[in-house]
Structure formats: C-alpha cells, structure tokens
Image (cartoon, grey):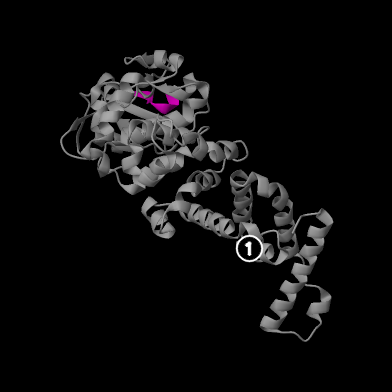
Amino acid sequence: MKVYLVGGAVRDQLLDLPVVERDWVVVGATPEEMLAADFRRADSDFPVFLHPETGEEYALARTEVKTGAGYKGFQVESGPEISLEQDLLRRDLTINAMAMDERGNLIDICGGREDLDNGLLRHITTAFIEDPVRLLRIARFAAKLGRWGFRVAHETHALMKKMATSADLMSLKPERIWREMNRSFSEPQPWRFFEVLHNCGALRRLLPDVAAEMGIAGHEKSNQAQVMAPLKQVVKESDDPVVRCGVALFAVVLMVSNQQAWMDKLRLDKAGRLLLSDLLDFNQQIDEMYQAECLLRFVVKLKPQQQPKRFQRFLIAANGLWPQALSVLLPVLKMAAEIVEEKVPESLMGSELKGPALGQALFAWRVNRLQEVIRNMGVPN
C-alpha cells in the first residue's frame, strides 16, 4: 500500500498558496483493508474513506468510464491493481493531476507543473467533455487563479464550447450549479466564474437571466464590464461570499418578473435571499431614503440589534451598488441604527402610554432624533 498527496493540495503548495484541505490517493489497497485500519466510508458510491484521526479523505486509486448520460453516468473501477498514473489521468485539469509521495517528490505525468508556470487551465484528455461538472469547476478555478494571470487554454475553450451545446449540460442539478457558484464567491476574482461560462456559451443555458444581462459574449454589445463592475468593487471591501453574491446577482434579480421564484430556482441560501430582498426593498425606496421617517422604518426592518451581520452585509453591498447615494446615506444609516439601539427615554417610560400607543410615540421620538442628526450633518432633504 502506498499513499500520495494529490490534487489541489499539491497545486496550491507549488503556487505557495495556503493549503485548505488535503486529499490522498491510496494505491494497492482494498476497501476491506481500509476498514480494517479504522478508516470510515465517506461515500456509498465511490471508494473514498475518512482517516480515523484527521478526518481527511483517502480515496482508493480508481478509473472512471462514461456509461450513461449526465455527470453521474460513470462506471467506477477501483482496486489494488489500479495505478497512480491511471488515477491521475481520469482527472480534469493538468494542474489538478499532480501527486507527491511521502518524501515530497513530485509525480507529474500530465505537464501540470509547466501549465502552472505558464498560467494555463488545460484539460488532460478529450474525456474532459464527458462530465459537465467540469465546466463549472474550470470556471471556479479561473475565479481562484485569475489574479495570477491564469487563463483557459485555447484547445480547452474549444472543448468547452462543444460541452455548452450538449444535452449532458442540462443534467446538472441546480444544487450543484449553486454549490460551485457559491464557492467562487470566496475566490479572489469571482466575476471570472460568470465570464468563463458566458464566453463558452454555457451560461445562457445554465443561468439564462444572468447571460442576458451580460449581453453577447465577445460582442460590442456585451455588458460584462458594466454588470460585473459593482462585484469587482465590492471584492476590494469584503471577502464575505454572501455580500459578493448579493452584489453580483442584484442587477439580474431586479429584472426578473418573479424574484422569489427565481431565487428558489437558483437554490440561493437563506442569507443570500435575505440580502437580495433587503437590497430590492432599498432600491424601491431609494429616492425617499433622505427622509428621516422612511429611512428609520427601513433600518428598523433590518433589525440591526438582533441581526448585526445582516445590517453590515446590507451596508457593504449597498455601498457597492449605489456608491454615490451611499456617500451621503451611509453615515445616516449607521446613525439610525444607533438611535434604534438607544434606551427608551424616561419621559416615555414614565408616561401612561401602553402597547401600540407607546410604540408610535417611541417611533416619533426616534424620527425627531434622526431629523436632528440629518440637519446637523447637512444632508439634503
């Protein structure tokens, strides 16, 4: 039995990037031997096991042969007779098909190190087209490595264009599309996820509303730069994937007829849906936000005391989408949140007001406080 470090951990180590997780390939072992060594099964469909102490994934060397439609239509074979080289050749990109032995020696049979040096995202064999998930993965790697000049190799882009027209592409589940998209929002250049898919033609089939907003890829009428400009700006301010997602998708969700249904179909998570809903509400009232009463009602709805992260996410995202308006409104929004958190004045607490009447009086008191702040700050009405 031999164990090798493989995939992303090797790639990132060679790029001097932080290694977030390590994956291992085991050659010359059987499932029974892994279980006897106290490894636990991690997947019922694939020969992947979890280390009893570290919890890291150890996969038996395997091959995959396309047998049916979709990204699950593969026959998997594993066993002690499968070599490391066979396992590496089944992978997607050359830069993800390198391994290291226990002494730190690099095993590179696909030219991954050279492609790392040249900044290329290149497929290994034409079997790349058999798995539509690879379109999403290469787009995510572009988001991860684009800041260092990585680009899709010409011959790989040609294969991606063929994949974009295939029936297999539509076998991708919304959950898988969302998973890869969401992971891209944590990468240094998340807009490249959309650009890569758009340029090969896959975006118009997977996320047609996003593609329509971006315009015709490579055409003078393309709106890529305009649509992605707020995302590029907010990336400088926040590494929160929820904020980045909200800014990236706002222009699109603003244009769809049934916004909640669109977010459901995308499988957007709860935090992302909440932020987009807050941004949509703000957009509807933005011209009235210079009035203390409207602005205060909006801030109260965001619950800055109970949900401070929600409020902070809104402020950062709104500043990315409406920088000119927020240059005036940002300090007022923050002050409104502070006023909402202030204790109820003794004059109201000692009054005979109860229930809704007390709530109305408290709101009026807060509006007066905010109006005073706005006047002192010189904010135009």
Residue at 70 percent across and 77 percent down: it is: 360
Q: Which residue is mark 1?
A: 298
Is residue 65 rendered to the left or right of residue 85?
left
Residue at 62 percent across and 47 percent down: it is: 322
* Direction front: furthest residue: 220
Above or below residue 223? Residue 363 is below
Image x and y of residue 371, in percent = 78, 64
Tell me the SS state at disc 1.
helix
* Residue 2 magenta-highlighted: yes
Image x and y of residue 237, in percent = 63, 39
Image x and y of residue 78, in percent = 22, 30
* Residue 213 magenta-highlighted: no
In this rendered view, identify the residue nearer to me: 32 or 154.
154
Q: Is residue 186 in view?
A: no
Q: Is residue 135 in view?
A: yes
Above or below residue 218? Residue 298 is below
- Identify the amino acid type marked 1: Phe
Is residue 294 rendered to the left or right of residue 257?
right
Is residue 68 rendered to the left or right of residue 205?
left
Crowding at dot 1, Cα within 10 Å, few <14 / some 14-19 / many 20+, comes out as some
Image x and y of residue 157, in percent = 33, 25
Q: How many marks?
A: 1
Magenta segment boundaries in residue numbering = 1-10
